[in-house]
Amino acid sequence: MDIVWQLRQQSERADAQESRLARFFLAKLGATEQATMESLATQAGVSPDVLRRFATSAGCQDLDDFLHQVRKAGQQRDVEFIDVIRQRQSSLSQQEKRVAEAILSDTAFAASATIEQLAGRAEVSAATITRFARSLGCEDIRDLRMRLARAPQVRTSNTIAPIEAITQALSQQYAQAETATWQRAAEMLRKARSVLLIGASGPQTALVAEVHQRLQSAGLPIAWIQDDNLLSMTLSRLQPDDLLLILAPDAVNSHVLSAVHHAHIQKTPVIALCAQTSDLANQADIWLPLPEAINARRYGILFALDQLEAAL
């Protein structure tokens, strides 16, 4: 049976209570996953007996059957929601396309990320995330996350960059910087009294740890500081013979910009790994490229690390 059609029919009936209940469940499609009959009755403002009678009037065998139909309809709606994002990509603004790409490349991340984290991954403002959510019929970022979280089964091969796309992104990354640039960066790293590594957080933290571990194993006096207070104290003590290494696969936050500002004041050289579109690329003494494609940057980080290790 088509429970959505049935609820829409009931929402237009003269019976005020039945109409209100139909509208309630239309608004709650898919949100009844963990709800009990008692909690639903409380949310709807009716007794459990009224809810049972309503389930029968909707053409279901009993309340369990009714809730099963509602949940199934909610899951289908959220699958369609992901499809809508894919279908609308071509008509979105440049900024909103970045949001769509970030969501489709890692739906699980988008379903749990804060508005700031998702904005950082997509390299857009928080306001753009809000506009994107509302343009898709969501009330806000929480509603967007909820609908994404209810559709984990749609994470197919479309969310993983194909090998051809990764290869192309890495080839473009390789072409953006000459061999001499990687060698000059490696020489600066070797000569530095100490290297301060800062940058990505959240899902990218494991990659920063990989960079830190491998450069440390290569004999570099490198420190990776994640605590903001300790970072501020360390930045204030930078010297011209130190070096600031910034890893920025996502949007650059205020802490990174503050670090660059301190480094410039202390005349400490800055090496930045970021996309060419980032403002950071122009502020660093040496810019090392990362792919423009967001879903290829994790591969780009490892590629850049291999290039540096080879030059050290």
Image (spheres, helix red, strand yellow):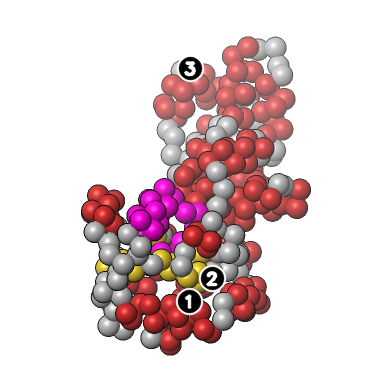
Q: Which residues are magenta?
A: 246-265
**Would residue 161 be seen by someone viewing this image from the given angle?**
yes
**Residue drawn at 57 percent across, 77 percent down:** 177
Q: Is residue 256 magenta?
A: yes
The quarter of the picture where residue 69 lies is top right
| In contact (CB < 8 Å): disc 1 and disc 3 | no
| Count of numbered circles on the image | 3
| In contact (CB < 8 Å): disc 2 and disc 1 | yes
Q: Residues within 10 Å of mark 1 (few under 14, many from 20)?
A: many
**Mark positioned earlier in the residue sequence (2 or 1):** 2
Q: Which residue is mark 1?
A: 304
The local secondary structure at tag 2 comes to strand
**Residue drawn at 37 percent across, 73 percent down:** 211
Of all residues, the one furthest to the right in this rendering is 91
**Would residue 146 be seen by someone viewing this image from the given angle?**
no
Amino acid at the residue labelled 2: Pro
Considering only vertical position in the picture, is 143 above or below 189?
Answer: above
Q: Nearer the viewer, residue 165 or 87?
A: 165
The local secondary structure at tag 3 comes to loop
**Mark positioned earlier in the residue sequence (2 or 3):** 3
- Gap in angstroms between the C-alphas marked 1 and 3: 59 Å
Q: Which residue is mark 3?
A: 45
The quarter of the picture where residue 60 lies is top right
Q: Which residue is mark 2?
A: 289
| Viewer-side label of 1, 3 | 1
Q: Image quadrant for the C terminus?
A: bottom left
- Gap in angstroms between the C-alphas marked 2 and 1: 8 Å
| Viewer-side label of 2, 3 | 2
